[in-house]
């Protein structure tokens, strides 16, 4: 008689259901062309609205999701994208904007950079230095909070001021949060309105001695604010008389970035 075969089944490994739901939530957001609401996500994933809300707060606290305060809807942040590119930093986006930044350096004779802005952070995507002797350098992939001084005790950079101006555009007078007002008493709604009126912002040695900067906003094809384009250099070369002409150059190049981003 042939020996009977015995089949053993390995016990299923335990699965963290909360983590699984969180990952499913992120996947649902990744499939969306725009922001999503709690109710529609709950319906799609067959979860309760309270469950989705709790998961969303955890994902926001961890930096993987951000809330659009104007619409009370949610979308993925760039954190996963940044993590997936550690060791090969931002090559795709860098290749898109690098030709425009090179043109900017040729036209202004000073260093330029492009940064994307998301929530309370901006990410330096690319930076092209001038060939001039005196230069200022930023690190590609560097993350800067828009509401905290780069140099302790100093003012905000023009990069941050322009970001704050357009992040708060269209919101209430509380567009600049209480936290920002306390940490940065020099930030006022009036100053942000002026930046939007002028279409650019400037730094006059407020964050780094003897260094000036001109910054313009960058929008996508849907006119949504996505980042900033900046020219910066020593005040001996980047003089106040050059602020407006450089802002006009940058504004034209920002349109090229918009078109290249598609």
Image (cartoon, rainbow, N blue to C red):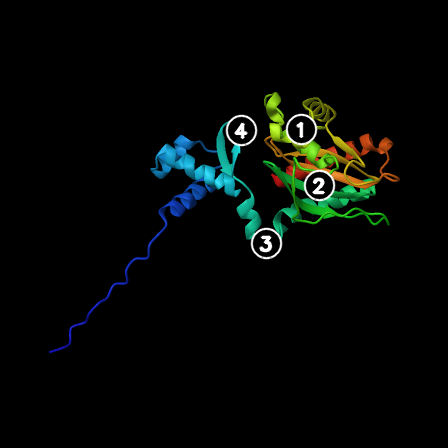
> Residue 210: where, in percent of width, then height?
84, 40
Determine whether label 4 and label 2 are within 8 Å by CB: no
Query: SS class of the residue under badge 4?
Result: loop
Label 2: how many Cα within 10 Å (few below 14, some 14–19, many 20+) = some
The quadrant in which the N terminus is found is bottom left
Q: Quadrant location of residue 252?
A: top right
Q: Position of residue 69 (x, y in %)?
A: 53, 29
At 77% from the left and 32% from the top, the residue drawn is: 202
Would you name the residue on which mark 3 appears? 86
| Dot 1: element | helix
Marked residue nearer the N-terminal end (3 or 2): 3
Number of the front mark, 3 or 2? 2
* Residue highlighted by disc 2: 150
Horizontal placement of 244 versus 188: left or right?
right
Residue 154 quadrant: top right
Residue at the farthest right position: 236
Disc 1 target residue:
165
- Disc 4 to disc 2, C-alpha distance: 25 Å
Q: Residue at x 82, y 47 (%)?
A: 135
Residue nearer the viewer, 67 or 75: 67
Above or below — where is 72 with respect to 130?
above
Question: In terms of depth relative to the viewer, which is nearer, 219 or 233?
Answer: 233
Mark 2 lies on a secondary structure that is loop
Q: Which residue is mark 4?
A: 69
Few, some or many residues within 10 Å of mark 3 (<14, 14–19, 20+): few
């Amino acid at each position: 008689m042939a020996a009977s075969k015995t089949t053993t089944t390995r016990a299923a490994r335990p699965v963290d259901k909360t983590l699984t739901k969180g990952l499913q939530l992120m996947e649902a957001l990744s499939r969306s062309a725009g922001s999503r609401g709690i109710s529609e996500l709950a319906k799609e994933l067959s979860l309760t609205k309270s469950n989705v809300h709790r998961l969303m707060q955890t994902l926001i606290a961890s930096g993987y999701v951000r809330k659009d305060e104007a619409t009370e809807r949610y979308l993925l942040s760039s954190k996963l994208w940044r993590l997936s590119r550690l060791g090969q930093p931002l090559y795709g986006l860098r290749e898109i904007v690098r030709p425009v930044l090179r043109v900017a350096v040729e036209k202004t004779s000073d260093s330029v950079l492009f940064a994307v802005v998301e929530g309370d952070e901006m990410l330096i995507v690319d930076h092209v230095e001038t060939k001039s002797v005196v230069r200022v350098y930023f690190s590609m992939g560097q993350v800067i909070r828009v509401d905290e001084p780069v140099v302790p005790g100093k003012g905000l950079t023009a990069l941050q001021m322009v970001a704050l101006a357009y992040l708060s555009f269209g919101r209430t007078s509380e567009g600049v949060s209480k936290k920002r007002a306390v940490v940065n008493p020099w930030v006022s709604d009036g100053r942000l309105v002026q930046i939007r009126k002028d279409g650019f912002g400037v730094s006059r040695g407020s964050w780094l001695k003897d260094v000036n900067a001109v910054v313009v906003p960058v929008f996508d094809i849907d006119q949504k604010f996505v980042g900033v384009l900046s020219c910066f250099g020593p005040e001996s070369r980047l003089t106040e008389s050059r602020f407006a002409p450089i802002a006009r150059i940058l504004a034209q190049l920002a349109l090229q970035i918009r078109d290249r981003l598609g």
